[in-house]
Image (cartoon, grey):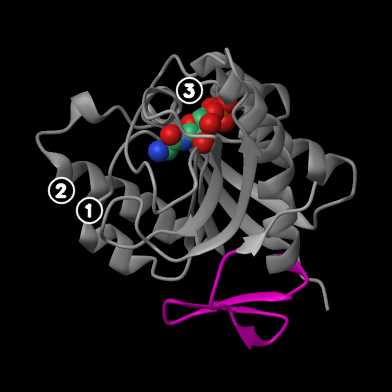
Amino acid sequence: MSRTIKLAVLISGNGSNLQSIIDAIDSGQLDAEIKTVISNNRSAHGLVRATRHGLPTWVLEHRDFEDRDRFDDALQHYLAAIEPDYIVLAGFMRILGPRFIEAFADKILNIHPSLLPAYKGLNTHQRALDNNEREHGVSIHLVTAKLDDGPVILQAGYPIKPGDKAADLQRRGHRLEHQMYPQLLRWLSDQSLVIKAGQIFYKQALLENPIQFKP
Ligand code: GAR
């Protein structure tokens, strides 16, 4: 049974993942409504994409806030009024505090460019190359209070080829990312994926390991 899920999408930069979600909605492949696009960076290109598609945007520059808690409080206040079903972190490069995460437990998703739990944090492509890895990947996980640490829901790996640079991995990862978020949101919308009390259920069974994405 499908339901229209209400999304708040948080970005900091280019917004190509946002674009993939917009495109999936526009083409009728995803039953969702983007209620707001929020950026902590005024010059994020993703804001241009959102405006072009007539989506409401809101800029919340962290520099304007005294500290992390006040930024989180303002964001929480704004989102509470919108009542999104899911808060989709799509290249949102800012750590959210535990109080915020608790307020929206089971609702915050993040996409991360690595095969979590490997390579949490930044510069994942270069770090994988520096370690002579043969595979890298993408993960979508539920956000919990620890950085890049919540249960991984959907994951895709890709091979690292000789001579690859960080930009090559990024390009390869992005191609997967742009299919993965729409897919995962589709499952949430048709309720084949359910998130409850920090646990993930896929087709009514508790998910013990990440679902492997098949392009
Ligand atoms: C994506 O590759 C995403 O995985 C990454 O930022 C990029 C944003 O691209 N996220 C993180 O590194 C989060 N730790 P986009 O702005 O084009 O969607």
Callout 1 amino acid? Gly
Kindly check if marks 1 and 2 are in contact, taking CB atoms under 8 A apart as contact.
yes
Q: Is residue 15 left or right of residue 80?
A: right
Numbered disc total: 3
Kindly check if marks 2 and 3 are in contact, taking CB atoms under 8 A apart as contact.
no
Magenta residue span? 189-210
- The question of residue 201 being in magenta is answered with yes
Asked which quadrant contains residue 51, the reply is: top right
First in residue order: circle 1 vs circle 2:
2
Query: For mark 1, what is the residue?
Result: 97
Q: Residue at x 48, y 41 (%)?
A: 114
| 132 versus 72 height, above or below | above
Query: For mark 3, what is the residue?
Result: 13
Callout 3 amino acid? Gly
Q: Secondary structure at mark 3?
A: loop
First in residue order: circle 3 vs circle 1:
3
Q: Secondary structure at mark 2?
A: helix
Does label 3 point to a residue whose CB lies under 8 Å from ligand 1?
yes
Percent of width and height locating residue 12: 43, 28
Asked which quadrant contains residue 212, the reply is: bottom right
Q: CA distance from mark 3 to mark 1?
A: 21 Å
Query: For mark 2, what is the residue?
Result: 69
Q: Which mark's residue is nearer the viewer, 2 or 3? A: 3
Characterize the local packing of mark 3: few (<14), some (14-19) or many (20 or more) Cα atoms within 10 angstroms: some
The N terminus: image quadrant: bottom right
In-front residue for pair 162/123: 162
